[in-house]
Amino acid sequence: MSDNVESYDQCARCGSSMSVEDCEWCPATGWYNDVYDPSCHVCHGSGIGRWCLSSPEWCEANPLPGRENTERHTVEWIDVPVTTPDQPGSEDEG
Ligand SMILES: [Zn+2]
Ligand SMILES: [Zn+2]
């Protein structure tokens, strides 16, 4: 069986790819400790911030249908089924 699903992150507003970076917004992160803040609006405690790769102008001007009010940098996870191609015929070795 190969009904695996991979999740990809994209900008929920414009559908662009996201840049993944360490969060620098957590009040408690950085030089002193590795405690991430669950209330952080960027990483939600994960320590990872995701950013829309498109320019602000493009992201603002090209929202996906119905996403006109979605904030830039909102992460949306897209599940993509991973289909592993079946081997046409198993080769018999030797
Ligand atoms: Zn965007
Ligand atoms: Zn954070």
Image: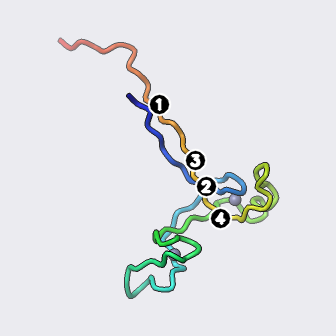
- Element at badge 4? loop
Q: Distance between the residues labelled 3 and 4?
A: 15 Å
Q: In this view, does 10 lie above or below 31?
A: above
Q: Are marks 2 and 4 in contact (CB under 8 Å)?
A: no
Which circle marks residue 4 in the picture?
none
Residue at the location (17% across, 11% down)?
94
Residue kind at label 4, given as amino acid type: His
Give the residue at mark 2. Answer: 76
Name the spot of residue 32 as percent of width and height, x first. Answer: 38, 88
Give the residue at mark 1. Answer: 83
Q: In this view, does 71 lie above or below 86?
A: below
Residue at the location (21% across, 14% down)?
93
Residue kind at label 1, given as amino acid type: Thr
In the rendered image, which quarter is residue 90 located in? top left
Residue kind at label 3, given as amino acid type: Ile
Q: How far apart are marks 4 and 1 (CA)?
A: 29 Å
First in sequence, mark 3 or 4: give its number: 4
First in sequence, mark 1 or 3: give its number: 3
- Element at badge 1? loop
Disc 4 C-beta below 8 A from ligand 1: yes
Q: How crowded is mark 4: few (under 14 residues within 10 Å), some or many (20 or more)?
A: many
Which coloring applies here? rainbow
First in sequence, mark 4 or 1: give its number: 4
Give the residue at mark 4. Answer: 73
